[in-house]
Image (cartoon, rainbow, N blue to C red):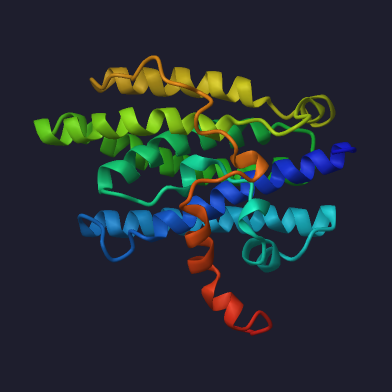
Amino acid sequence: MNTTLEILTKFLYKTADDQLIIGHRNSEWTGIGPILEEDIAFSSIAQDKIGHAYSIYSILHEQLNQGIPDIIGFTRNENEFWSCQLVEHPIGEYDFSLVRHFLFDNAEFIRFNELSNCTYEPLAKLSNKIKGEIKYHVFHADSWMSQLANGTEESKNRIQIAINTLLPIAFSIFEPIENESELQTNFSITSELELQTKWFALISEKLNSWGYSLPINFDLTQHLGGRNGKHTPFLQPLIVEMTEVFRLDPEAKW
């Protein structure tokens, strides 16, 4: 990377790619939620995430000379996506998806809250809107995490197992891009390390208050690579699936 705008471009891509991929993963609960309320909730959250991705891709197109959102979202190869590895995993059972939802959306609320104060105006303006929507995503995740902690022994144990599995992977959210410090200097964009520190303190307090425990002594680097195009085996099949209709006729008008 040679210029600050190139670094900003990659930052926006990775932020939007996270939203697009988790949006498609969440959409897989449509029609199969454990109760009707959750079927609707995950579908609504998925729609929000894909909308957030579209809005960030629109900034890339309108301000930074990238392709139109549909082209950006549906024509790149796997190694051209910069999503974190957390969002790529299949939905699994409901406990898995709920804990991922909790870890990811608490992180994203902190991220967009910070971005609403950055000096890159198009992103600050959009982030102020997005953080208001993610606030309700966090409320949804927190409510269910709390309820299941006070449910049956099985419900609490299953959530605890999902926490143990997903927390190490969740640190991939904060994998920095190359020359990230340029964004702090030029646009007052908070560093990934600072976001990670705030997030870990927040989720630790919440999980402890509900009676869950945090796994210890795990490798924080094991699930990195997504920000450099190195992904889990789960991403490519998802890209094929989510671009299937677009690839039938990229010029189609709906």
Residue ID at (61%, 56%): 78
Residue ID at (34%, 45%): 97
Rendered location of residue 150, percent (x, y):
16, 29
Name which quarter of the figure residue 165 lies in. Answer: top left
Name which quarter of the figure residue 161 lies in. Answer: top left
> Left or right: where does residue 214 sit relative to residue 239?
left
Residue ID at (53%, 37%): 108
Residue ID at (46%, 32%): 170
> Left or right: where does residue 11 sit relative to residue 110?
right
Q: Can residue 156 be seen in this view?
A: yes
Q: In this view, does 103 lie above or below 22?
A: above
Rendered location of residue 244, percent (x, y):
53, 74
Q: Is residue 49 visible?
A: no
- In this rendered view, identify the residue nearer to me: 126 or 218: 218
- In this rendered view, identify the residue nearer to me: 229 or 108: 229
Rendered location of residue 34, percent (x, y):
21, 55
